[in-house]
Amino acid sequence: DGVAILPAPSNLSVHSANMKHLLVWSPVALPGETVYYSVQYQGEYESLYRSHVWIPSSLCSLTERPQCDVSDDITATVPYNLRVRATLGSRTSAWSTLKQPFNRNSTVLTPPVVAISKDGFHLVIELEDLGPHFEFLVAYWRREPGAKEHLKVLRNEGVPVHLATMEPGAAYCVKAQTFVKAIQRHSAFSQPECVEVRGEALPL
Amino acid sequence: GLRRCPISMDMRHLQESFQDIQRAIQANDTFQNITILSALDSLQGIKPLDVCCVTRSLLAFYMDRVFKDHQEPDPHILRRISSIANSFLYMQKTVQQCQVQGRCHCREEATNVTQIIHNNYNQLEARVAAVKSLGELNVFLAWISENYQDGSA
């Protein structure tokens, strides 16, 4: 019958960074034809309790591109099965299933992009908006021997945050890392960034 | 209260998932005057010592009965139920570790609470009971949120 004439997509894999999960595959090459793809998933609950149940991806039913953002489908820290099939007119391919189930706790967490600035004597930090999963651990210190490192936990509201009031003539450095509670992991720290406050150092 | 079994969970996402489907699910509840979880004022009276046991029992109730008995045709609602079910599965794994470590003991009081829930469920045809229990997820989520505030996301 015509169902399996269409070749199935191949080489499925998930690229995941900072809790954004992208399912990619090798497209079905049919010159002059537009092939569409549909993605389905099942969490560990479905595979354990209702293995016949596959759920249509929220973003990728009959999509043209050989990729699918499944971030809104992978919403628990358990293994997920993912599968794709091709469609051309009335013909559909067999399903291709990801070889290994994907768990979001394997996502790559990159050091956050940090922008620091001075507002008068105020040390201000602005953090990259990485979405609702992310908290930021910010460390800042005065650049001098034996300086104490101060820590602050920030959720990213997308607005600059006042970190400290600086003293004239001193330099201050900042670094940050992300923390994702849903997977209980944090990123590496960003490279320290420093700013200096002009003016005479205050007499001791 | 005594936190015997701290559970990490994304409570904000769980509540958002439920609120997104609450109206649709409750609209299918044909026995509005009967309750399965809500009748239980005793859920509020659970002692910290019994919190883990009741959590374990209610997670199992939803995983082994409610989600299994419910057939959902709407993909959007199915996604939300799947999200909740898989989040409960993740929580269940944490609770099971606590149980293995002897930190999730069940006393008679706690067992009685969940037995009442099962008895209520058995009074109704399975699909009807499943829809009602799904519609009362907010009772369970509120109870979890209250008892695991430092463990929730």
Image (spheres, coloured by chain):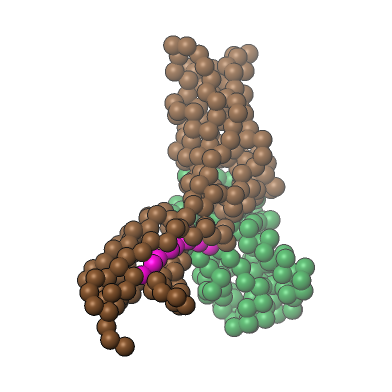
Where, quadrant-wise, is the C terminus of chain A in this rendering?
bottom left
What residue do we see at 74% from left, 69% from top? Answer: B99
Asked if residue B135 shows in the view, the reply is no
* A65 left or right, relative to A98: left
* B81 left or right, relative to A169: right
Q: Nearer the viewer, residue B118 or A81?
A: A81
Q: Residue A147's x, y, as percent?
A: 44, 77
Q: Residue A195's x, y, as percent?
A: 32, 65
Q: Residue B15's x, y, as percent?
A: 48, 61
Q: Colour of chain B?
A: green
Indicate yes or no whether the magenta region holds residue B117: no
Q: Residue A69's x, y, as percent?
A: 47, 40
What residue do we see at 73% from left, 75% from top? Answer: B103
Up/down of B73 relative to B37, above or below: above
Give the quadrant of residue B151: bottom right
Magenta stretch bounds: A172-181
Q: Nearer the viewer, residue A126 or A116?
A: A116
Asked if residue B63 shows in the view, the reply is yes
Give the quadrant of residue B126: bottom right
Indicate yes or no whether the magenta region holds residue A180: yes
Up/down of B85 relative to A53, above or below: below
Q: Nearer the viewer, residue A4 or B137?
A: A4
Q: Nearer the viewer, residue A27 or B124?
A: A27
Characterize the magenta stretch by its predominant secondary structure: strand
Tell how many labels. Answer: 0
Up/down of B126 relative to A95, above or below: below
What residue do we see at 67% from left, 77% from top? Answer: B4
* Chain seen in brown: A
* A153 left or right, relative to A160: right
Where, quadrant-wise, is the N terminus of chain A in this rendering?
top right
**Residue found at the far top of this picture:** A32
What residue do we see at 50% from left, 47% from top? Answer: A17
